[in-house]
Amino acid sequence: MQLKLYISILIILVTSGIYSQNRITYSQYMHNLGVFNPAYFSLGEEFTATAYYRRQWLGIDGSPTTKSLVAGLSVKNKHRVNLNIYQDGITIFNDFKVGLGYNYRIKMTERSYLSLGFKADYGQFQSNYTDLTVQDIGDNVVLNNPSSKRYLNIGTGMYYQSPSFFASLSSPFLLNNSVLKPLNHLGSFALKFNHIYAAAGGKFHTESVAFFPTMLLKVVGGAPPQIDLNANVLLYQQIWLSGGLRNDLTIILSTGYVMRNGMKLIYSYDISSFSNAYYSAGTHEISLGYGFSFYRLGLTRKKYVKKSGKFKRKFKVRPSF
């Protein structure tokens, strides 16, 4: 027992800081990479928008809850403006931010494009200490620590898309924002660190089944990389099924429906890893969006052909790129 105590004291004395991933994680990143890449665009779509709701670790008090809206509008097939709204909460802390972005699209080949993007965010981080049950009512750190702090951040990214492949690289928050400061040398800094996101995916399909393998890598200094590997299937251009694995042993399952008008409704369930499965009932994520061009095989158009004195209706699929 004493040995464990001495080791714990030693770790505290020699450790100057402990850092971890503290940016929003999405299981449905493949449906709108604009959540972390300002260079994202959707070929064949002038307007795209996706609203997300994510509730993590059900069964654990104060678990993270995220709400977001990501929308983009293309202008003259080269320019695009984006709007991002986020609200992220955990225990007594709430982070709200609004961002505006711009990207410029460069035509690489007949059907492939590269986009370069930039964005700026304005945010407000709030903490409500009155929700805490305090043992020491006169604790200066709890009573006087700032309950609200505003901040600015900037981000950038690159995005490439062809009819059968996409690749994304971005750093959406270049500045390491300090959201809380110590008071009279008490307490500690709370920082939101810059993360780097890399994503890629491909498309393989027949007339009725499309297979989309995708990958997301998230990297931040001081923490292990987070990797998501996903196998996505779209049946008859409408029924979405997906299975994935995160390197913390989290299993990701998704299902949804894609409407002919471009609307989509997707639900995901993250099964907790074996280490915390006893404490959490998993994570739920739901999204409602418009714009699905990469995952759509083509546009179905009716064609009437006169045969034997009668008009016979035929269906022809034209690529959407």
Image: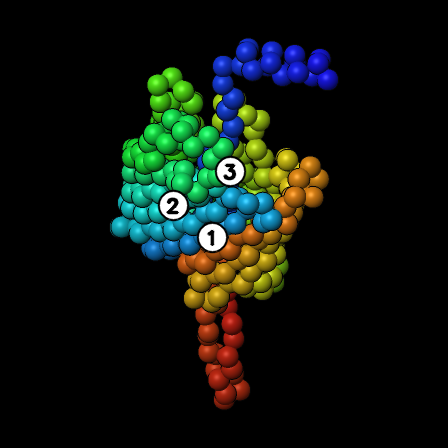
Give the distance between the C-alpha atoms of the residues marked 2 and 3, in whole angstroms: 21 Å
Which residue is drawn at the image coordinates 45% and 52% (left, top)?
52
Q: In the picture provided, is 21 more to the left or to the right than 156?
A: right
Q: What residue would you read off at disc 2? A: 86
**Quadrant position of the N terminus in the picture:** top right
Q: How is the image coloured?
A: rainbow
Question: Could you say which is closer to the camera, residue 125 or residue 267?
Answer: 125
Question: The residue tagged with tag 3: helix, strand or loop?
Answer: strand
Dot 3 alpha-carbon crowd within 10 angstroms: few under 14, some 14 to 19, many 20 or more: many
**Which label is found at residue 36?**
none
Which residue is drawn at the image coordinates 56% and 29% (left, top)?
225
Give the distance between the C-alpha atoms of the residues marked 1 and 2, in whole angstroms: 10 Å
Q: Are marks 2 and 3 in contact (CB under 8 Å)?
A: no
Q: What residue would you read off at disc 3? A: 199
Dot 2 alpha-carbon crowd within 10 angstroms: few under 14, some 14 to 19, many 20 or more: some
Residue 300, image x, y percentages: 48, 67
Residue 121 vs 292, above or below: the answer is: above
Q: What residue would you read off at disc 1? A: 53
Furthest residue toward left: 76
Labels 3 and 1: the sequence-earlier one: 1
Residue 280, image x, y percentages: 63, 46
Which residue is drawn at the image coordinates 64% and 49% (left, top)?
281
